[in-house]
Amino acid sequence: MTVDISGRLLIWGVRVVAHSRRLGRASVGDLRQVYEQFKVADAVHSLEAMLDVFARTARAPVELHASGCRCVSLSECRLLQAVAAVQYGCFDIARRRFEQWLPPSAASWIMGPACGFGRIFANAGLMLPIQDADDTERQATMAMRSWQVGSLTLH
């Protein structure tokens, strides 16, 4: 799947935070440093809040690949779609995407940090890509078949 810089920053950020937490590291200094280069360092707080919601309330696993992996999992595609929908004001679509993993109350709560993340990215000129759900699922499936990469789940 071809993802522009804004999408890559989101997916990479999710991977870094999730893997740091899994390893018991509280610091996401590398993430903050990279995000600062794009003038979106404040988005780290929103990203951490979103992933905290997933870590505490997810009822289904989120498949994440390693931070340097060029492949994008179907879960990562859907997460990108959810945050992009929030950024464009399509809140019902975003909530439905989040409800794939989260209970309804958590899916509603995560909208706040997702809005903050989207606003910070938009203010820096980084608009997340909106893609058709069927197209994204097809592309992600093809990408997963062409790269033999182990993945971790956030749950």
Image (spheres, rainbow, N blue to C red):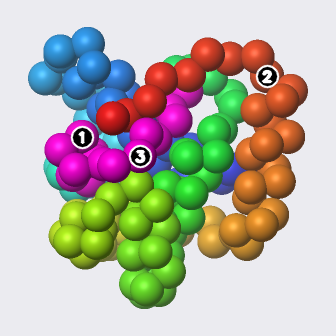
Name the quarter where the C terminus is drawn: top left
- Per the rendering, the mark at residue 55 is 1
Residue 42 location in percent, x, y? 21, 53
Q: Which amino acid does label 3 sit on?
A: Ala
- x%, y% of residue 56? 18, 44
Question: Residue placed farthest to the left in the image?
Answer: 26
The three-letter amino acid code for the residue at tag 1 is: Ala
Left or right: 85 as drawn, with respect to 16? right
Residue 146 appears anywhere in the view: yes
Q: Which of marks 3 and 1 is nearer the N terminus?
A: 1
Examine the rendered structure and indicate whether residue 63 appears above or below residue 134.
above
Judging by the rendered image, the residue that carries numbered circle 2 is 147
> Label 3: which residue?
60
Distance from Cα at disc 2 to Cα at disc 1 = 27 Å
Q: How crowded is mark 1: few (under 14 residues within 10 Å), some or many (20 or more)?
A: some
Q: Which numbered mark, 2 or 1, is in the foreground of this view?
A: 1
CA gap, disc 3 to disc 2? 24 Å
Q: What SS does tag 1 mark? A: helix
